[in-house]
Image: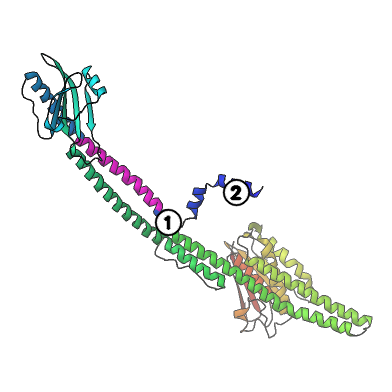
Amino acid sequence: MTPTAERAAKTVGHPRGLGRWHRLPIVLRLVLAVAVTMSLVLSGAAGLVYWQVQQALDEQLDADLATYSHDLRGDLLAGRRLSGPDGSAYQILTPQGRITEASDLVRTQHLLRSADITSVAGGATIRRDIGGLASLDPHTLRLKAQRVRLPDRTVIAVAAVRRGHRDEALRELLAQLAIAMGLTLVAASYVGYRTARAALDPVERYRRRAASLADGTSGVRLPVPEDRDDELTRLGHTLNEMLERLEAAAERERRFLADASHELRTPLSLLRAELDVALHRPRPAAELTETLRSVDSEVQRLIDLTNALLDLEQLGGTDHLARSPIDLPELVASAVDPYRAVAAREHRSISVDVAPGTVDVDANWIHPAIGNLIDNALRHSHGDIHVTATANGRLRLTVTDEGPGFPADFLPKAFDRFACAEASRTSPGSGLGLAFVAAVAASHGGTARAENTGQGATVSVDIPC
C-alpha cells in the first residue's frame, strides 16, 4: 500500500476530528464532555422555562386584547365614544384602508398592510405583532383586526395593546437564564475537573512510581490504599501482583545466571587444564585415553548440571502443573526400581512401604523428585534405604537412610541450591538434588523437610493431592 493510500485508509478509519479528540488529555476530555452535556441540559431547561413564561404572558396579553377588541366593537355598534384602557390603541379604517378615527398613539401609523386590509374586508380576522422582542421600542403592539358592520357603513376595527411589559419581562428572563446557565456551567466544569483530577491522580502516582522501575529499582510497589475497594484500587493491587511476578521472574533469571556461571566455571576450567596438559607435549596413548576419560567425566558433569539448572528454572516459572490421577504404588515403584541394581552392587537394599491409593499430581515432576531422594541417599549414606508413602488428601512421602545423618549446621540450608555438607555426607554431586525436591514440592503447594533420626537421615515431602 502506498503512503497516500495508507493516509487515506487512516482518515477513513479514524476521522480527523475524532483523532484530535483522542489526543487530548483525559482530564480535558472529561471536562469538555461535562461542559457540553451540562450546556445541553441547561439549554433544554432554560428553553422550557422561557416557553412556559412566554405562554403565560401571551395568554394574559391575548385575554386583554380579546376583551378590548370586544369592548371596541360594542362601542362602535352602540355609537359610543371610543376609548380604551391604558396601554391600548385603536384605529377605525374604511374597507379601502383610509383611517377615519384613531387613538393618539397610532394616529399617523398604519397598523395594517394592504394584504391585511383586503383579508379583513373580506371577513377574516387578523392577529399579529408589531415590533420584535429584541426591539427596545416601548410601543411594540399586538393587534387584532376585524370587520364591523354598522347600520350605515362597514368599517375595519383594529384593537391593539402594548407588548412592552411582556417583552421587557421576557428579556429580563433571558438575561437571568443566561447568567444562571453561565454560573452553573462554570461550577459544573470546575466540579468535573476536580472530580476527574481526584479520580486520575492515583493513576498518575502509579505512573510515576512505575517509571522508577526503569532505573532498576527493586522492591517497588504502587501506593494502594487498603481501606478502599474501587476500580483504581483493584487496578493498583493487580499491578502490584504483576510487579511481584516480574520481580520474582527477574530474580529467578539473575539466580539462574549466577548459579550457572558459578558452577560451570569450575568444570570448564578443569577441562581447559586437562586439554592444555594433553597438548603441551606428546603423550602416550594410555595417558591420552585417561585424559579423555577425565574430559568425558567433566562433560557429563556439565550436562547433568545444566539439566538440573534448567529443571529448577522450569519449575520456578511453572504457573499450572499438569496434574492427573495416578496410582501411588505404581508411581513410587517406577521411581525406585531403577536404583535397586545400584543398591544391590553395594550390598544394600531399598524397601518400599506404600499405602494403596490414587494421587492427583504431576507425575512428570514427582517421579524425578523421588529418584533424586533415592540417589541422594545412595550417595551420602550407607546401609539400607526405606521409602514410605501414604495418600489421604495429602501425599506424604518419606525416604530414610542409615548413616551419620546431616551435620547440624547443614540442616537449615539443606534445600538451598549448591548446598553441600562438609562432613561425612560429602561426595561428588552438584548440590541441586534436594533443591529440586523442594521446588517440586513448592510447585504443588507443599513442603519438603530434612531431619536426623539418630540412625540416619530422613527427607520427607508433604503436598496436597
Q: Is residue 375 above or below residue 74?
A: below
Q: CA distance from mark 2 to mark 1?
A: 27 Å
Q: Position of residue 430 (x, y in %)?
A: 71, 77
Drawn side of residue 155 relative to residue 196, left or right = left
Magenta span? 32-57
Is 391 colored magenta in this rendering? no
Instruction: Quadrant for the C terminus, please.
Output: bottom right
Q: Is residue 111 above or below residue 325?
A: above
Q: Main secondary structure of the magenta part?
A: helix
Amino acid at dot 1: Leu
Q: Quadrant of residue 375?
A: bottom right
Residue 7 tag number: 2
Q: Secondary structure at mark 2?
A: helix
Q: Going 24% across and 25% down the picture, which residue do you hit?
A: 113
Residue flagged by tag 2: what amino acid is it?
A: Arg
Q: Is residue 229 left or right of residue 455?
A: left
Work out whether 50 lies above or below 27: above
Quick one: label 2 or label 1, which is nearer the N terminus?
Answer: 2
Residue 196 in the image: x percent, y percent?
Answer: 40, 58
Few, some or many residues within 10 Å of mark 2 (<14, 14–19, 20+)? few
Residue drawn where x is 63% and y is 48% of the image: 4
Residue 146's disc is none
Foreground mark, 2 or 1, reads: 2
Residue 44, magenta (yes or no): yes
Question: Eyeballing the image, is 268 above or below 21?
Answer: below
Which residue is labeled 1 in the image?
28
